[in-house]
């Protein structure tokens, strides 16, 4: 069900539609008409173009927005590396990641009262390299403090998909506000500056940074023209600004800190004017949010367990059709009705890597409770690492009556699935101290032999018609 448990202040008005050409003005008349860059834009604003794709990207891929702002974003002193550096925050050099075939599971990650959204971001696993615009990073965030109202953050490394798990994020972006609650996600595109407040206490969740391309909706094929995540349910902000500046870009009354994530290193500068001075904007490059409760889940109404790709919310394609750098897949509450079918996920090995998290509740293939797959925790089944239901879940599902059953009420697991082998950071493997020892043995060490064939003798293959 859609999220409903929060009052909506007026600032959270949204514009609906995935990948839509949108426009918004906080002051009537701020948008130039029939023109992007007039000699003197309305109200004395500066016109600034923000490109999310190459200028020459084909129309169906092209993402650009025009921002009309009080001062251009280039007006700041040089960036310097953030001191002190946080060595375990964004380890990304492929040589330093740990590539291991073992199944991994993490207990719920800790909240952190000391960190804000930026200092509380930790890379757990990743693939590729932001300097080559290839691959992705998988993060956990834990924020106990709001970011300062005089700070902003942007990442040059990629688009950030945020999966809120615990706590509410009130995100002020250059293009307006997004309120992101548990069971909601948002995407902040590369380069867009933002600030994260915590209106309801500490927050924790997951994030995926996409170093290449952008998320899109999966094809629907024979499903038809509606279903899964419907475009109309994606919401983008309306323009919102605060005037705080001097008479030039250098003499304003307030110092704003801008932190940049650039090749997984943080840089900082301070400027005497607010970055949140965009009075109007139009274009296709904008942040958006989505309520996972609006997902139209589709499944088997006859037999067999379908591939989890039917649960894809967003996909980031590679250059090879059908093969994603990152799929964002959810396992929401749903009816299982398949006949003569082992209903939970099958045992399998996958050429794609599977990082999973649990937003709430329990997952039908894994033990819940302490030491199991728990909200705020995670698992990683890397390329070709065998996995599937743990022994108890298998036995339960094997013995279960096959009346229609609703699974996952109040639950939602998700998966970041990638065609790339992901390496785990030193933080993810050791420093976080959340890796469960004996995950594999606990899950599958007790898998029973059900073989009913003849004992002894040497089985030989034979031709069916021989
Ligand atoms: O491994 C998992 O739990 C995720 C998953 C779920 C499913 O229904 C089918 C395949 C799959 O990888
Ligand atoms: Fe899987």
Image (tube, rainbow, N blue to C red):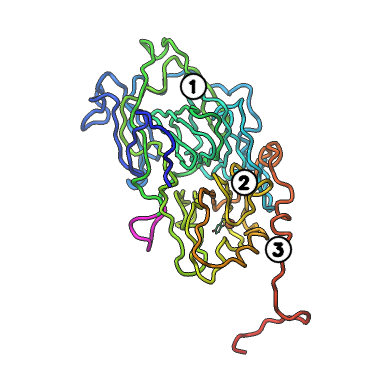
* Image coords of residue 406 (percent x, y): 50, 58
Mark 1 or 3 closer to N-term?
1
* Image coords of residue 418 (percent x, y): 54, 51
* Image coords of residue 181 (percent x, y): 47, 37
Q: Which mark is residue 374?
A: 2
Q: CA distance from mark 1 to mark 3?
A: 52 Å
Which residue lies under the disc numbered 1? 151
Q: Which residues are magenta?
A: 218-227
Mark 2 or 3 closer to N-term?
2
Which residue lies under the disc numbered 3? 447
Left or right of 314, for residue 427: right
Give the quadrant of residue 5.
top left
Check disc 1 and report its element: helix, strand or loop. strand
Give the quadrant of residue 263.
top right
Left or right of 345, for residue 390: right
Q: Any magenta on residue 226?
A: yes
Give the residue at x 63% y 49%: 373
- Badge 3 crowding class, 10 Å Cα cut-off, few under 14, some 14 to 19, many 20 or more, is some
Give the residue at x 41% y 11%: 252
- Badge 2 crowding class, 10 Å Cα cut-off, few under 14, some 14 to 19, many 20 or more, is many
In front: label 2 or label 1: 2
Check disc 3 and report its element: helix, strand or loop. loop
Disc 1 residue: CB within 8 Å of ligand 1: no
Vertical position of residue 164 compared to residue 405: above or below: above
User: Which of the two residues, 49 or 308, is positioned nearer the viewer here?
Assistant: 308
Specify the quadrant that holds the C terminus.
bottom right
Quarter of the render that holds ligand 2: bottom right
């Amino acid at each position: 069900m859609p999220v409903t448990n929060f009052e909506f202040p007026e600032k959270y008005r949204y514009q609906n539609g995935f990948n839509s050409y949108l426009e918004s003005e906080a002051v009537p008349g701020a948008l130039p008409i029939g023109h992007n860059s007039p000699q003197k834009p309305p109200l004395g604003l500066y016109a600034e173009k923000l490109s999310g794709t190459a200028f020459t990207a084909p129309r169906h891929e092209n993402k650009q927005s025009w921002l009309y702002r009080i001062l251009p974003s280039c007006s700041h002193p040089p960036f310097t590396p953030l001191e002190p550096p946080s060595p375990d925050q964004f380890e990304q050099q492929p040589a330093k990641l740990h590539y291991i075939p073992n199944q991994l599971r993490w207990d719920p990650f800790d909240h952190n009262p000391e960190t804000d959204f930026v200092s509380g971001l930790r890379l757990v696993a990743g693939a590729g390299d932001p300097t080559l615009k290839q691959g992705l990073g998988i993060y956990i965030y834990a924020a106990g403090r709001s970011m300062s109202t005089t700070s902003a953050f942007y990442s040059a490394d990629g688009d950030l998909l945020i999966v809120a798990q615990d706590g509410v994020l009130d995100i002020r972006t250059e293009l307006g506000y997004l309120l992101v609650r548990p069971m909601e996600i948002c995407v902040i595109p590369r380069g867009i500056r933002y600030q994260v407040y915590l209106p309801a206490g500490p927050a924790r969740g997951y994030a995926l940074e996409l170093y290449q391309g952008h998320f899109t909706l999966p094809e629907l094929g024979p499903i038809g023209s509606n279903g899964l995540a419907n475009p109309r349910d994606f919401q983008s902000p309306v323009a919102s600004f605060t005037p705080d500046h001097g008479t030039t870009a250098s003499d304003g009354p307030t110092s704003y800190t801008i932190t940049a994530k650039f090749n997984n290193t943080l840089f900082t500068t301070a400027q005497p004017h607010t970055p949140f001075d965009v009075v109007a904007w139009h274009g296709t490059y904008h942040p958006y949010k989505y309520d996972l409760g609006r997902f139209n889940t589709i499944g088997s109404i006859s037999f067999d367990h379908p591939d989890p790709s039917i649960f894809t919310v967003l996909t980031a394609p590679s250059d090879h059709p059908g093969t994603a750098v990152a799929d964002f897949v959810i396992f929401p509450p749903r009816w299982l009705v398949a006949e003569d079918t082992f209903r939970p996920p099958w045992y399998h090995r996958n050429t794609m890597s599977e990082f999973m998290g649990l937003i709430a509740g329990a997952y039908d293939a894994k033990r819940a409770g302490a030491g199991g797959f728990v909200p705020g925790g995670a698992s990683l089944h890397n390329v070709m690492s065998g996995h599937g239901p743990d022994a108890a879940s298998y036995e339960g599902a094997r013995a279960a009556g096959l009346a229609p059953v609703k699974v996952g009420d109040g639950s939602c697991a998700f998966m970041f699935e990638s065609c790339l082998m992901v390496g785990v950071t030193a933080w993810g493997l050791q420093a976080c101290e959340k890796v469960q020892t004996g995950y594999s043995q606990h899950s599958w060490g007790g898998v029973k032999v059900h073989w009913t064939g003849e004992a002894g003798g040497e089985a030989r293959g034979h031709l069916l018609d021989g």
